[in-house]
Amino acid sequence: MLYMPSVFGESLMDDWFEDMDRNFFGKKNPLYGHNAQNMMKTDVREIEDGYEMDIELPGFHKEDISISLDQGYLKIQAQKGLNKEEKDEKSGKVIRKERYAGSLARTFYVGQNLTEEDIKAKLEDGVLKLNFPKEDKRTIPEKKTILIEG
């Protein structure tokens, strides 16, 4: 674990990458805009028989998100693309065309004995909500994909 003096605050790396985005794109990252620093913030709550996890994914749709379980690790990936084209209104000729693509990913250890059927996922108002039971002592199959409801 990397320890930094508290004078840097929690957003040192975010601020550094924001500066890189500004230098590369000439402004903040066009895919995520002012939401970039809020991507994939996660809350995990323990409930009586399991866990609830909320992951913030503003601007993403169900089709942009994939969830997989492999050897006890739950991996959440979100990918997004943006095509931007500007045309001269008089001639109709393209004067600028840009394409952007980006992806985010987080991995959480949830236990060796969970299966994809144990994990429930729902995307609601830009928040991916996951529910899964506490680990029990079953054997598990190989990697599987988890479907998002809704």
Image: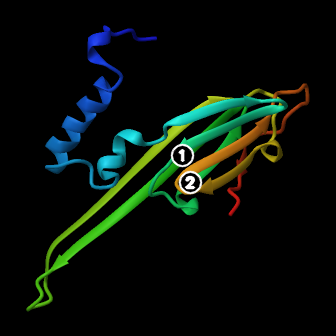
Residue 65 in the image: state x and y as whole percent: 56, 54
Residue type for callout 2: Ile
Furthest residue in direction left, as rendered: 90
Q: Is residue 44 above or below residue 33?
A: above
Q: Is residue 56 above or below residue 16?
A: below
Residue type for callout 1: Gln
**For residue 68, side relative to residue 38 (left or right):** right
- Say which element carries label 1: strand
Asked whether disc 1 touches disc 2, contact meaning CB atoms under 8 Å apart, the reply is: yes
| Crowdedness near tag 2: few (<14), some (14–19) or many (≥20) residues, C-alpha within 10 Å | many
Residue 24 in the image: state x and y as whole percent: 17, 45
Residue 20 in the image: state x and y as whole percent: 20, 37
Colouring method of the image: rainbow
**For residue 79, side relative to residue 55 (left or right):** left
Residue 89 sits in quarter? bottom left
Q: Name the one closer to the observer, 66 or 16.
A: 16
In the rendered image, which residue does mark 2 sit on? 65
- Say which element carries label 2: strand
The residue at the point 24 percent across, 38 percent down is: 18
* Numbered tag placed on residue 77 in the rendering: 1
Q: Name the one closer to the observer, 1 or 11.
A: 11
Residue 60 in the image: state x and y as whole percent: 48, 57
Furthest residue in direction bottom, as rendered: 90
* Numbered tag placed on residue 34 in the rendering: none
Residue 2 sits in quarter? top left
Q: CA distance from mark 1 to mark 2?
A: 6 Å
The residue at the point 70 percent across, 40 percent down is: 69
Furthest residue in direction right, as rendered: 138
Q: The C terminus lies in which quarter of the figure?
A: bottom right
| Crowdedness near tag 1: few (<14), some (14–19) or many (≥20) residues, C-alpha within 10 Å | some
